[in-house]
Image (spheres, rainbow, N blue to C red):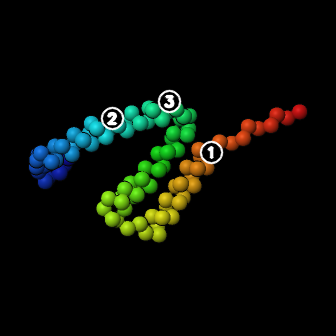
Amino acid sequence: MLFERTPIRWTGEFVFALLWMAVVVSVGAVSLLVLLIRRNAVSRVAGLFYLVPVSAAALAWLLFAQPIGATQALGVAIAAMGVVLATRSLPAPTPRR
């Protein structure tokens, strides 16, 4: 914003959106992160960050009728498989005798 030449029009809509993103979304995201970390291992919660683009694409499809192409579908599948592999519980190793 420091190097932009276009002036900012401080309308009520803009101020509301700015405050919403800066306060409500940020506080909500941090609160959700803390809640998830309290209930799960940090390593499991960290894997969920890879689903943020997937949820953004799903919301864009749902709210704005934005089509999901083959490339996006492949990306969703790869991200989902990665999260499943990273967060799955492995069986305890059997002790050697």
What residue is pinned by disc 3?
38
What residue is pinned by disc 1?
88
Classify mark 1: helix, strand or loop: loop
The x and y percentages for residue 52 are 43, 50
The image quarter containing residue 66 is: bottom left
What residue is pinned by disc 2?
27
The x and y percentages for residue 34 are 44, 32
Q: Give whichever of discs 3 and 1 has the lower sequence position.
A: 3
Of residue 55 and residue 53, the one placed in the foreground of this image is 55
The answer, for residue 2, to whether it is visible in the render is no
The answer, for residue 85, to whether it is visible in the render is yes
Classify mark 3: helix, strand or loop: helix
CB under 8 Å between callouts 3 and 2?
no
Q: Give whichever of discs 2 and 1 has the lower sequence position.
A: 2
Marks 3 and 2, how far apart at CA: 16 Å
**Label at residue 69:** none
The x and y percentages for residue 89 are 65, 42
Residue that extends furthest to the front in the rendered view of this protein: 62
Q: Amino acid at mark 3?
A: Arg
Classify mark 2: helix, strand or loop: helix
Q: Pointer 1: residues within 10 angstroms few (<14), some, or many (20+)?
A: few
The image quarter containing residue 40 is: top right
